[in-house]
Amino acid sequence: MEQEFNFYIKEKTSQFWKATIALSFGSFLVFSNLHFTQPLLPLISREFEVSPAMASLTVSLVTLSLSLFLLFAGPFSDHIGRKNLMSFGLLSSSLFSLAIFFVSDFWVLLILRTLQGVTLACLPAIAYAYIAEEFEKRAIGVAIGLYISGNTIGGMGGRIIGGFTSDLWGWRYAYLTMGLIGIFCFLLFVFYLPKSKHFSPNSLELKQVIGHFIIHLKNRELRSAYYIAGIIFFIFMGLFNYLSYHLHGAPYHLSSSLIGLLFLSYLAGTFSSTFSGKLDAIMSIPNRMCAGLLIMLVGVLLTLFSSLLMILIGLIIVCFGFFFVHAAATNWVSILAKEAKGSASSLYLFFYYAGGSLGSYVLGFVWEYFGWYAIVTVTILLLLAGLKITLGMVVVQKNEKVKMTL
């Protein structure tokens, strides 16, 4: 028993690959469900006769409810454990996708998507805590990178599946397809993910939970990572939401399936998230975040061109930079949080998804009244704010290294 307790999952072992494959399938399911509605937004606007900002609620409400429930899912998992709660979330979210197939009322659609966000929250915060507890320290960065690769494949695959199935049979069949895929991912997740060996339950007391949140929020370095999380996902969700409308209209007139294919740009993020984790030994995390934000800035500027090719190249660069930053920031939180890691991850993802929810909805009004160039302008200003925060983190880290050498 002592030998089993001391066992941590080491990189490149069979246990490592089983665990990362299971978490990646779970990640795929979460992020495909979050994002596959984006290429469908013009179709939903047309069928239910609602504005782009209203149609975007099918995306923003699920991210909002997910972000709010993350505040409870992380601490709850600190009390009852990781795997069972993650499994419950994957199964129930898939059942909600199947239920949406039968929806004929826009408000019922919004209610079901909101409830789906609650169940999807059961995986993301807990997955980071599971990795931090069960993996050997030097394997954590790579494991997080691979897990986030599942995010990118899910976001990309979901949009492509949504685009093609909606063009072939209608948007409801996109939900039916995602529900069936979700059941398959759930079964693989349950079969492959090893049980926790290093989980120690905490008592579920409101005062203690709030205390953990306060401790994390008082930590300046953690707080900076939380701000970055909100900024990058605000940009990412808003940019991709209204790119669908931008390319659906003149002069492009692209179909939902072709718009979905543009999300192949996510493959750049699949590579960059893993690459970011492998740079642990040669590049500090704050420096990696700075580099990723600069890369995103270049990509956003390229979307100002009218050429479809330049827009695609811009999207590839944005995806590369976004997931590069995201992988570095989640690694930062996993390392800095010394206690209640589930709560620390929950706060990170609360800021992350709350930012995405705001970006998805608020930029809808920017699009309606001012158009694509205004969206790009807001995005650039937010990236500059993010760069200011990360440069402050670089300076703090350098000062701490100088103190340690004195």
Image (cartoon, rainbow, N blue to C red):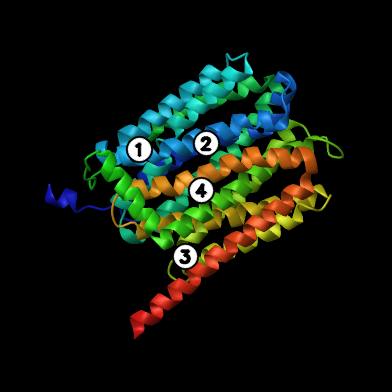
Q: Residue at x 53, y 65 (%)?
A: 390
Q: Which residue is mark 3?
A: 285
Residue 394: give x, y in percent of width and height. 49, 71
Q: Residue at x 63, y 49 (%)?
A: 235
Q: Which residue is mark 2?
A: 64
Q: Earlier in the sequence, mark 4 or mark 3?
A: 4
Tell me the tag on residue 149.
4
Please state which amino acid type lies under the numbered disc 2. Answer: Leu
Residue 11: give x, y in percent of width and height. 35, 56
Alpha carbon distance from label 3 to label 2: 28 Å
Secondary structure category for the residue under label 3: helix
Q: Residue at x 70, y 54 (%)?
A: 300
Left or right placement of residue 296 versus residue 229 in this view: right
Residues marked 4 and 2 touching at CB (< 8 Å): no
Instruction: Name the foreground residue: 258 vs 253.
Output: 253
Please state which amino acid type lies under the numbered disc 3. Answer: Ile
Q: Which residue is mark 1?
A: 192
| As drawn, 1 above or below 333 | above
Secondary structure category for the residue under label 2: helix
The residue mark sitting in front, 1 or 3, is 3
Left or right placement of residue 310 versus residue 35 in this view: right
How many residues crowd mark 1 within 10 Å: few (<14), some (14–19), many (20+)? some
Q: Earlier in the sequence, mark 4 or mark 2?
A: 2
